[in-house]
Amino acid sequence: MSSVLIKNAQIITMNSREEIIHGDLYIEDDIIKQVGGDLGSETDQVIDAKNKTVIPGFIQTHIHLCQTLFRGQADDLELMDWLQKKIWPLEASHDEESSYYSAMLGLGELIQSGTTTIVDMETVNHADAAFQAMAESGIRCLSGKVMMDMGDDIPELLKEDTAKSIQQSVDLLEKWHQYDNGRIQYAFCPRFVVSCTEELLTAVRDLSKYYNVKVHTHASENRGEIKIVEMQRGMRNVVYLDKLGLANENLILAHCVWLDDEEKRIIKERGIKMSHCPGSNLKLASGIADIPDMLDMDANISLGADGAPCNNNLDMFNEMRLASLIQKPKHGPTAMDARSVFRMATIGGAKAVGMADQIGSIEVGKKADIAILDLFKFHTYPSYDVDPISRIVYSATRADVDTTIINGKIVMEKSNVKTINKEL
Ligand code: GUN
Ligand code: FE
């Protein structure tokens, strides 16, 4: 048995009462055993968290680790041009080694910035190497190879035969789903309606039901993309996914910038999980998703950085800040307040991946996926009187993350942090 005791912390629990408490936090193996109080110091690892803030680890629900190495490419293109001219040829150029290191680089950045769970989409080839990196990094993740069996503009190396795409996905699922006690889960990843045949999408529907796994895809990100879907299928993205029987609570839908009222209703009624990617939506000039409206409808919304080339980093602090700032000019200062954004980044993400009973908040019995922040390092008034959530959303950066713990394991610890390893 291993144990970690975090002493004297400010703990942002994100429990149902969203309590913020001061005291100790005790972890045994992968589970939070006690929250609050003074728990002494009789354990093997003790972290002094005086003047530090403990938060639930961030959950990012839309990431492409396979794109981390393509940062800085095609910064001034819109989605379809960007995919065709840059991203697809670059994804086609991956070999096993570059896939592994692309994933490792992204995972390092995610863990250093306090992200403990991701929903990822790999490229067509070499997804196995990326899974290997995810296994080694300690991250909690849902991931899968991208599936794309349609389109004239796709490079030869990415264009898939339908049956082969399905078979390769199932092979990866059989190998990686539930690896390390469920820390890694498989998710089917049809890229977007534009590049998937109906045969592929219906097979994904049946397989996701059979294996009870998530489906992770993009929809209604860009007006040009929506036009293509309307030409190809005669209807809008979410309506089409609903017609195929894919619109259900296992569907994680990235972007959803341009939704009409019918699509919004389907998302809410079917329990689809929306992944909002504000940095990507700005950089690719896709638009500003109407998140205040969707929150009013009580839809499930979480956050993702998308791929590194979509916004140049994978940092949840940026996404939280942007998610709030982009709504303020139109909707006023409180429409997307700090707490709503922080909720999307933590417990909202946990609901999206169907694990709200296990992650997303700091509560006894939950998995120990947490980050320890030093919010006073670069902020001038070291006072607990300031709302820490406001501080995190509007002024914290990844430099403020001291320690990241996933499944009870310390996976990142800055050298200025002292963990005392005691002989038991
Ligand atoms: N739509 C289809 N593929 C992609 C992708 O790789 N990134 C983004 N942002 N949107 C997509
Ligand atoms: Fe994406």
Image (cartoon, grey):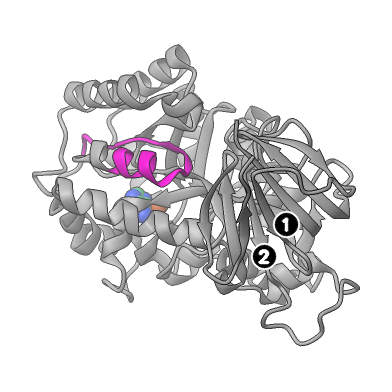
Residue occupied by mark 2: 373
Dot 1 lies on which element?
Answer: strand
Please give the count of numbered marks on the rendered protein.
Answer: 2
Q: Is residue 280 left or right of residue 19?
A: left
| Nearer-the-camera pick, 373 or 318 | 373
Q: Residue 56, image x and y in percent?
A: 68, 50
Which of 323/150 is in front? 323
> Residue 387, image x and y in percent?
85, 69
Q: Secondary structure at mark 2?
A: strand
Q: Are marks 2 and 1 in contact (CB under 8 Å)?
A: yes
Answer left or right for 314 relative to 189: right
Residue 44 visible in the current orientation: yes
Q: Magenta region: which residues?
A: 130-150
> Is 417 on the left or on the right of 163, as rendered?
right
Q: Looking at the picture, which amino acid does disc 2 mark?
A: Leu
Whether 33 is drawn above or below 306: the answer is above
Give the Cα separation between the discs numbered 2 and 1: 6 Å
Magenta stretch: residue 349 in it?
Answer: no
Q: Which mark is residue 54?
A: 1
Task: Give the class, few, some or many, for how many residues have Cα within 10 Å of label 2's Cα (few <14, many ≥20).
Answer: many
Answer with the quarter of the image where residue 419 lies: bottom right
Residue at (79% x, 73% y) in the render: 332
**Position above or below: 357 against 116:** above
Give whichever of discs 2 and 1 has the lower sequence position. 1
Question: Residue 35's quadrant in the figure?
Answer: top right
Residue at image location 90% in from the left, 48% down from the top: 37
Which percent across, then down, holds residue 300?
67, 41
- Res 259 visible: no
Kind of residue indicated by mark 1: Val
